[in-house]
Image (spheres, grey):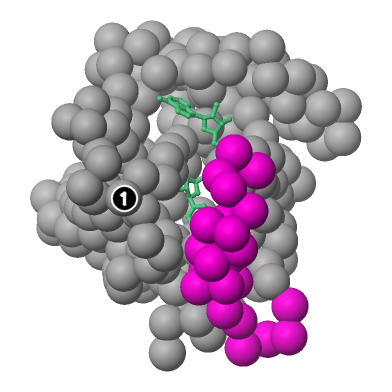
Amino acid sequence: MTSAFADVSTVPVTDLLSLAGRRAVVTGGAQGLGKAIAVRLAEAGADVLIGDVNEDRARAAAAEIAERFPVRAAGVVMDVTDSGSVRSAAAAAAEEFGGIDIWVNNAGIFPSVPVLETPDSTWDQVFAVNARGVFNGSREAARHMTGANRGGIIINIASTAGFTGTAPGLSAYVGSKHAVRGMTKQMALEFAPLGIRVLGVAPTFVPTEGNMAAAAAQPPAESGKAMAVMTNSLIGRIGTPDDIARVVLFCASDLSTIMTGSTLLADAGQTI
Ligand SMILES: NC(=O)c1ccc[n+]([C@@H]2O[C@H](COP(=O)([O-])OP(=O)(O)OC[C@H]3O[C@@H](n4cnc5c(N)ncnc54)[C@H](O)[C@@H]3O)[C@@H](O)[C@H]2O)c1
């Protein structure tokens, strides 16, 4: 069995960073962090399938990648809350590319509602996307990786909200991101014998289409208070989607073969 844990001590650094010949799936990759991640994986040489509930945007992002880089790229509809939909998208990746080596569980939602006003449906939807979606994606990725006997790497996009509390209104979100960290540890244990690494990346606040729209939908006073909490940074600026994508690229590459089960804080020092 090929393992993502192979000793690569004598491999040149450019080869370690190369993802040539690897096949990647990015959930929720039609925009925001997922799209930036898909772009960097493709630049490093990976074929990339973007799965997203927004099929048109997934296809558009894939077309943009195929135009920029000499890799195969595809966009398909995928709802991470639905295991059948995840299975179909994974099958499409395996058919299009011949297998799956890298799976990024990135799709996530972040509705902001104070606890006292949160309906059951909001809690359920946040956990369905952010927690069950990670479970569904990881299970499907591991099935393909194990079936091909090649090992692989699964990367879960958590959040600093998986380490600390954050702005009011995000209780379900914070709970779901703590769950992602827990699954990252437990799946790393279970998948290590299969040659599969599992890592988390926990971004700080980074402006994206999704969270800018969410902020715009809130009363200005509320979103101002939330921003003040979330944009706390030690580096003199807030992060960009590509700041996060480069950390994911490190995780996906053989530079990080010693690592599994941990969640890397990509947080501009926010949680110190
Ligand atoms: N942007 C940030 O500040 C930040 C910080 C920490 C963590 N994160 C995490 O990063 C991830 C991406 O966030 P973003 O800011 O890029 O969000 P975004 O809203 O800009 O993009 C999310 C993408 O996921 C897709 N999506 C939503 N539900 C889906 C589902 N059920 N199945 C498949 N796709 C679905 C959306 O269509 C969209 O394309 C999320 O998990 C989020 O929690 C973001």
Instruction: Report the number of discs.
Output: 1
Asked whether, in this view, residue 42 is left or right of residue 99, the answer is right
- Viewer-nearest residue: 142 or 172: 172
Which secondary structure lies at badge 1? loop
Residue corresponding to mark 1: 114
Circle 1: is it few (<14), some (14-19), or many (20+) Cα within 10 Å? Answer: some
- Say what amino acid the circle numbered 1 marks: Pro
Residue at 41% x, 46% y is 112
In the rendered image, residue 26, in percent from the top left (x then y), is placed at 52, 35
Asked whether, in this view, residue 229 is left or right of residue 155, the answer is right
Say which quarter of the image contains residue 257.
bottom left
Image height check: is 144 above or below 193? Answer: above
In the rendered image, residue 98, in percent from the top left (x then y), is placed at 50, 20
* CB of mark 1 near ligand 1 (< 8 Å): no
The answer to whether residue 8 is visible is no
In the rendered image, residue 177, in percent from the top left (x then y), is placed at 30, 54
Residue 230 magenta: yes
Q: Which residues are magenta?
A: 216-237
Residue at 65% x, 43% y is 216
Residue at 50% x, 18% y is 53
Farthest residue toward the right? 67
- Viewer-nearest residue: 210 or 116: 116
Check the picture and name the quadrant holding the C terminus. Answer: bottom left
Check the picture and name the quadrant holding the N terminus. Answer: top left
Image height check: is 127 above or below 261? Answer: above
Say which quarter of the image contains residue 110.
top left
The answer to whether residue 129 is visible is yes
Residue 78 magenta: no
Residue at 48% x, 32% y is 27
Image height check: is 215 above or below 95? Answer: below
In the rendered image, residue 229, in percent from the top left (x then y), is placed at 50, 73
